[in-house]
Amino acid sequence: MKLVYEDEHGAYLGVNAEFLQEFVPKESNPNFEVFDSRDNHRRFIAVKSSRLPDDQDLAKGKYGIDFHRAKPELKEALQYGDELPHALESMKWLANMAFAASTEKEYDRKAATWDNYYSYVWGSTPKTIWVAPHSGNVARAPDDILPYPEHVMDAFTAGVAAPCAFNDSKKALKRLMISIHSSSFLITVLELGGFGILDEEKLAAVAKKTETKYHKRAQKLADEHKQSYFLFVNRWLKHINKKRGTLNPAELNQAATTDRQRVELILKGLRLCGQEIREFTPEEFREAIKSLNKAEVPMISYNYLHPASHVGKILRLSEKIGLGLLHSALNIECSKLYLAKEPELITKIILDIKNELFD
């Protein structure tokens, strides 16, 4: 059941008439939209702007903001802006700060937008808040720093977050945020991230139960999923090796690059399927990836590739919980292929997980 409009790349464009039978608009601006259910127990937030700091249209008030990062101080945002576009290679900025700015006026506008977004997340009223924080289109031109900018967009996430909100039949007794993302680095179908606030044993139990229930059905797309993963991973490995001259994370770490993180995600995915890389040569990676052809696709992982504990820390989720502005939160990374091809299945799985964890 499609309840939102998305472009061919999976970027959120808006909700349809069927969704508006159950939800009413609360906010619409160039950067995000907010809708509340008529029973006031559910909220849907979809981002329309890019998460990349130099992918924006200032004249239209459409900013490059990563809403899953911390709002910088003025000095930090100006330094971030000074270092663009090369700052996109540094984990110092991309992993920590929500936006860059070139002037104090620009900073104030972006800070106000970030604050406005979180005014719909924090609160004392019981509500389940379904968010797609990276669902906006990425229009940045490719270059040597970021050759595949389209990979940065969390494609088709709004198309699952919206039906999750629509079909979430449980009355909200506490305030809960569920954040939905997509990743082509994901060898599993789903990854649960606890934001550093969820009980590890409970996450493990829910992951195991979900794996048992949906593993067989997930295998219907297994071959296509693996092929998509192979193409994506090989593309990045080839680019990184050509640019850096190495695929060894220890050597990539000298430049503190996002390329190191990309290689580490690939290594962890291979390790999850029993493949250990030791020499970090292109040939070794190719052989390890090819060996996955005969493996089944793991259904679900938790706190492994994307635990979201770092995001939970920079968003100060524990502090917000202590102040009564949130009860709990869950981060869900989904395979882009499954989001695009099996949104109804992913919606059903996520609602099951939500009910197991919080009801």
Image (cartoon, helix red, strand yellow):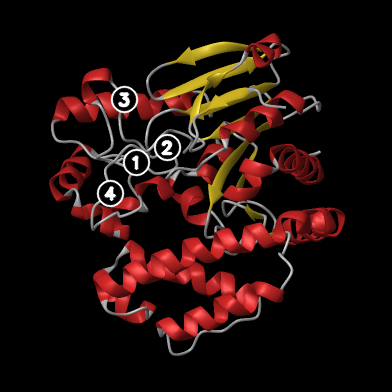
Image quadrant occupied by the C terminus: top right
Name the spot of residue 6 as percent of width and height, x first: 53, 29
Please report whichever mark, 4 or 1, sits nearer to the chain's N-terminal start.
1
Q: CA distance from mark 1 to mark 3?
A: 14 Å
Q: Is residue 123 visible?
A: no
User: Mark 4 — residue?
Assistant: 142
User: Going 78% across and 39% down the picture, which residue do you hit?
Assistant: 348
Contact check, label 2 and label 1, Cβ < 8 Å = yes
Disc tally is 4
User: What amino acid type is highlighted by mark number 2?
Assistant: Phe
User: Mark 2 — residue?
Assistant: 67
Q: CA distance from mark 3 to mark 2?
A: 13 Å
Please report whichever mark, 4 or 3, sits nearer to the chain's N-terminal start.
3
User: Going 65% across and 37% down the picture, which residue do you hit?
Assistant: 327
User: What amino acid type is highlighted by mark number 4?
Assistant: Pro
Q: Relative to 250, does residue 44 appear above or below in the rendering?
A: above
Q: Secondary structure at mark 1?
A: loop
